[in-house]
Image: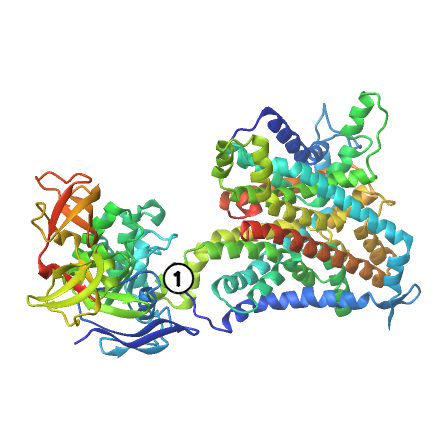
């Protein structure tokens, strides 16, 4: 039974459609992320769920109740804004206790609940500090505590990690997931960062131009993207255009005269298609012993991996190889490349 | 940033001296023991300051100016807060025109305002009314308050209001507990700026004050055109002291350069 | 994030709107009407209408002289403020932190002191016992008479108006990317060329803005010509005062005041439009 349901939700600004007949069902306790490039409508969708933007068409239901047109201060949702939006003139404690004050919770109870919330985000000693005295990561945790202390049915996160530097972002991803799991709140996050979406969510909703293009678990989304855009947006992908051919051994895709075997596909022989292959699925092989030969055009050292750009007859391929004990390839070195036909994805 | 050469620093020194000269002279002459407008060199006396406090005209005029300035600053702040929020929070046709209207007293010469209000007051029988004088000053100082409130309101993170709403606050609570505290520096800075501008105002006031409601600058102007003695210097020195006091408070609260120049 | 409600902003602005309509728009309208009223020296303002006052202002030599004097005093004041204010703003912007704020404050603080006090201060400095005359006498140059001449008015006006010139220029300078000057120098431009071709064009909007404000305020100045110009040196504002409070010829005073206002607005709007548009294009709405 869906906890939060969006049914045919649309948003128009004048004549321009920003969200187009969106349908989404979120289960209780789930962590769902709306992922997409800027302008895809994900933030507008979140604003509609929160009540800050009017819904032009469609309905939003929470735990059986229609909240489509209820005021934002009666929905009782917990929200963490991109800028954290902490009240600068209040201490951390006063910030977190604000929502409880609005609910007329008694002072001693408030103090206890605030202390619990701050302990959850590891900021017990910061209760009397002001937001300006805190670092970005600490402010974010205060914002989280403030949203969670009211025990909301749904937690909304608007690009919560985008203002943090890379290292902190990674740490907070795990922290966020851990807190969400321990508290069990249904959570909807909005982000344009695909690695963030993949690492924390139970399900990822990919949006483009106001529409949902795919909803799946992170692993499924990564392994089986349904469009070229998704395959390139979520992770890196080698995309090469070619033609489908039918052979005795099965379906193949022919690119610049070379045929590659691929798995079952509904696409007809003779139609144009794209081959999508993840860089880490391509393996280095001795020369002439792989599916194709190539020459290293450039290489980049990424610490735990080597990224090779390899020129082949079929086109430029990006190959990622783990920084193991074997010696890395040199520039201009020739090598063979191989992969399993199961790793190939054919996209229209 | 390149450094300033000695020529530049000399130029700066001259400009600074130029700006301070009349104020310094006035304060010095105020301490003269004699009856003429000379800068005291050997003796310093407070007799002229004492004379000011005994001069009932000046004392009355001072109180008029003080209450007028407090009332005008407070009234203008009270109307500028909602107006400022309206301008910064909403998109509506006529917003720019409205903003222009509220800032127009800065462009209309005080002379013209004085003359126009004199006509109005005479037609509605408001000459001599302290209340109408307060309204006139409120009109003149509102642009100062409004500018600072608009700056503070557009500079604040609007999401804080949304956060407060989402946590269950009513719109009134959001205003009192979140918005107002966050724009308070702009509000107090605006009040002080309005106060000092009303207190100082002479050109418009000279047309709309009556012998009963005469303000200190007007009284000083009249006195300066009739007689010339150190009493005028003493009153002026006191006004400079008052202004310096207000400036100090403004600077502590908000940053004087921010108010006079505007936010970057 | 607010939703567009059509009534809320108007309700919030209502008290301010009421004040401005009642005390700004209505009186201005009344004054405009007043300028057409007939005035009789014996009986006062009459209910009939005439163009006599406008005709008098535009044909009588006396008014021509007053307007001309007002105009050139305002122009000279603006010019001096520009020659002094622009370099000063530039010098201030190159100072290091504690000094910059301190000097900026000293230059701007007089804005908060009443113009009466400042004018009085100048009358002390420029009068027969003032420091300039003392220096002149000490150097055996005889008495120099500054007070009650145009130059006394100009000097005091410059003092009052200088902050109004410095503020917009200062603001323009603050918006400058400090790296731009260094970029020019690294491309082998001389410091002077850098100033002329890189810094100056970006400051022009500030210069324009400052000049317009100073000109407008100087042309309508009252207290300074009143205290430093004496009975014979009249500018438009002091003539208006005379008409209103001495001659009681309000319609004529109203006429003069309105002409001053319209002249002010015309100068501001046309100058503004022509030159700023030129610079807005090159700077992309600077």
**Residue, far right:** C42
- Secondary element under disc 1, as helix, strand or loop, is helix
**Residue, far front:** A257
Q: From the viewer's side, name the closer residue of B182 and B73.
A: B182
Q: Is residue B97 left or right of residue A181?
A: right
x and y percentages locating residue A103 in the rendered image: 30, 67
Q: Is residue A96 left or right of residue A266?
A: right
x and y percentages locating residue A300 in the rendered image: 21, 42
**Residue in view at x 75 percent, y 45 percent:** C75
Q: Chain of mark 1?
A: B
Q: Is residue C138 above or below residue A82?
A: above
* Residue B46 found in image quarter: top right
x and y percentages locating residue C180 in the rendered image: 49, 39
Q: Is residue A69 left or right of residue C58?
A: left
Q: Is residue B37 above or below residue A161?
A: above
**Residue in view at x 9 percent, y 51 percent:** A290
Q: Is residue B75 above or below residue A153?
A: above
Can residue A53 be seen from the camera position used here? yes
Q: Is residue C39 left or right of residue A60?
A: right
Please give the residue where the numbered disc 1 appears in the rendered image: B161
Q: Is residue A205 above or below residue C80?
A: below
Q: Quadrant of the N terminus of chain C?
A: bottom left
Disc 1: CA contacts within 10 A as few (<14), some (14-19) or many (>=20): many
Q: From the viewer's side, name the closer residue of A311 and A115.
A: A311
């Amino acid at each position: 039974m869906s906890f939060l349901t969006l049914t045919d939700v649309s948003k128009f600004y004048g004549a321009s459609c920003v969200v187009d007949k969106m349908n989404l069902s979120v289960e209780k306790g789930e962590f769902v992320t709306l992922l997409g490039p800027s302008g895809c409508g994900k933030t507008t969708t979140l604003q509609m769920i929160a009540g800050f933007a009017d819904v032009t068409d469609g309905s939003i239901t929470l735990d059986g109740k229609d909240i489509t047109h209820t005021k934002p201060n009666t929905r009782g949702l917990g929200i963490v804004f991109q800028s954290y939006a902490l009240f600068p003139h209040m201490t951390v404690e006063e910030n977190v206790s604000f929502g409880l004050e609005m609910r007329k919770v008694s002072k001693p109870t408030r103090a206890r609940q605030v202390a619990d919330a701050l302990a959850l985000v590891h900021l017990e000693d910061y209760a009397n500090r002001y937001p300006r005295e805190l670092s970005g990561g600490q402010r974010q945790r205060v914002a989280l505590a403030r949203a969670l202390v009211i025990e909301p049915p749904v937690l909304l996160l608007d690009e919560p990690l985008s203002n943090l530097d890379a290292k902190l972002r990674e740490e907070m991803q795990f922290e966020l997931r851990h807190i969400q799991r321990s508290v069990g709140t249904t959570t909807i996050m909005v982000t344009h960062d695909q690695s963030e979406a993949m690492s924390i969510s139970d399900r990822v909703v990919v949006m483009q131009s106001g529409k949902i293009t795919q909803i799946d678990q992170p692993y499924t989304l990564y392994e089986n993207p349904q469009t070229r855009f998704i395959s390139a947006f979520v992770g890196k992908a080698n995309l090469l255009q070619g033609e489908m051919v039918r052979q005795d051994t099965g379906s193949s895709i022919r690119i610049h005269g070379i045929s590659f075997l691929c798995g079952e596909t509904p696409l007809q022989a003779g139609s144009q298609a794209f081959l999508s292959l993840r860089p880490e699925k391509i393996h280095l092989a001795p020369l002439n012993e792989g599916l194709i030969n190539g020459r290293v055009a450039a290489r980049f050292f990424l610490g735990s991996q080597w990224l090779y750009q390899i020129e082949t007859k079929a086109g430029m391929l990006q190959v990622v190889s783990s920084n193991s004990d074997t010696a890395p390839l040199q520039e201009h070195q020739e090598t063979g490349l191989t992969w399993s036909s199961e790793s190939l994805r054919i996209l229209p | 940033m390149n450094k300033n050469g000695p020529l530049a620093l000399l130029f700066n020194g001259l400009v600074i001296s130029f700006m301070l000269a009349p104020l310094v002279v006035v304060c010095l002459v105020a301490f003269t023991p004699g009856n003429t407008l000379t800068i005291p060199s050997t003796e310093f006396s407070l007799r002229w300051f004492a004379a000011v406090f005994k001069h009932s005209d000046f004392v009355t005029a001072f109180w008029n100016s003080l209450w007028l300035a407090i009332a005008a600053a407070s009234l203008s702040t009270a109307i500028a807060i909602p107006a400022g929020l309206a301008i910064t929070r909403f998109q509506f046709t006529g917003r720019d025109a409205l903003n222009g209207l509220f800032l127009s007293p800065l462009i209309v010469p005080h002379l013209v305002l004085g003359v126009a209000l004199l006509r109005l007051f005479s037609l509605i029988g408001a000459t001599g009314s302290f209340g109408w004088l307060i309204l006139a000053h409120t009109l003149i100082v509102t642009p100062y308050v409004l500018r600072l409130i608009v700056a503070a309101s557009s500079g604040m993170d609007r999401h804080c209001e949304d956060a407060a709403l989402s946590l269950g606050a009513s719109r009134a609570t959001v205003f009192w507990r979140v918005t107002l505290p966050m724009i308070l520096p702009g509000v107090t800075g605006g009040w002080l700026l309005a106060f000092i501008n009303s207190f100082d105002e002479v050109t418009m006031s000279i047309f709309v004050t009556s012998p009963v409601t005469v303000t200190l600058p007007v009284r000083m102007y009249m006195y300066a055109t009739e007689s010339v003695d150190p009493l005028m210097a003493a009153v002026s020195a006191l006004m400079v002291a008052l202004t310096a006091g207000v400036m100090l408070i403004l600077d502590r609260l908000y940053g004087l350069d921010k108010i006079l120049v505007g936010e970057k | 994030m607010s939703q567009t409600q059509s009534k809320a902003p108007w309700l919030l602005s209502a008290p301010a709107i009421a004040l401005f309509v009642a005390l700004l728009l209505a009186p201005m309208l009344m004054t405009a009407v007043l300028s057409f009223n007939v005035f009789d020296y014996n009986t006062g303002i009459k209910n009939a209408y005439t163009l006599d006052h406008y005709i008098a202002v535009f044909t009588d030599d006396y008014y021509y002289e007053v307007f001309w004097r007002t105009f050139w005093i305002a122009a000279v004041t603006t010019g001096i403020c520009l020659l002094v204010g622009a370099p000063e703003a530039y010098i201030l912007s190159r100072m290091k932190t504690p000094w910059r704020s301190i000097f900026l404050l000293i230059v701007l603080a007089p804005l908060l002191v009443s113009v009466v006090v400042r004018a009085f201060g100048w009358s002390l400095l420029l009068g027969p016992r003032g420091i300039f005359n003392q220096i002149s006498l000490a150097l055996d140059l005889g008495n120099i008479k500054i007070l009650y001449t145009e130059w006394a008015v100009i000097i005091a006006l410059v003092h009052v108006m200088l902050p109004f010139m410095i503020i917009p220029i200062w603001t323009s300078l603050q918006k400058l990317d400090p790296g731009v000057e260094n970029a020019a120098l690294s491309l082998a431009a001389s410091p002077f060329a850098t100033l002329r071709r890189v810094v100056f064009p970006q400051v022009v909007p500030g210069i324009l803005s400052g000049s317009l404000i100073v000109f407008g305020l100087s042309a309508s100045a009252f207290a300074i010509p009143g205290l430093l110009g004496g009975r014979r040196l009249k500018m438009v504002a002091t003539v208006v005062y005379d008409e209103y409070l001495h001659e009681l010829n309000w319609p004529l005073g109203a006429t003069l005041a309105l002409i001053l206002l319209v002249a002010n607005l015309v100068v501001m709007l046309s100058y503004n439009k022509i030159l700023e548009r030129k610079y807005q294009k090159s700077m992309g709405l600077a």
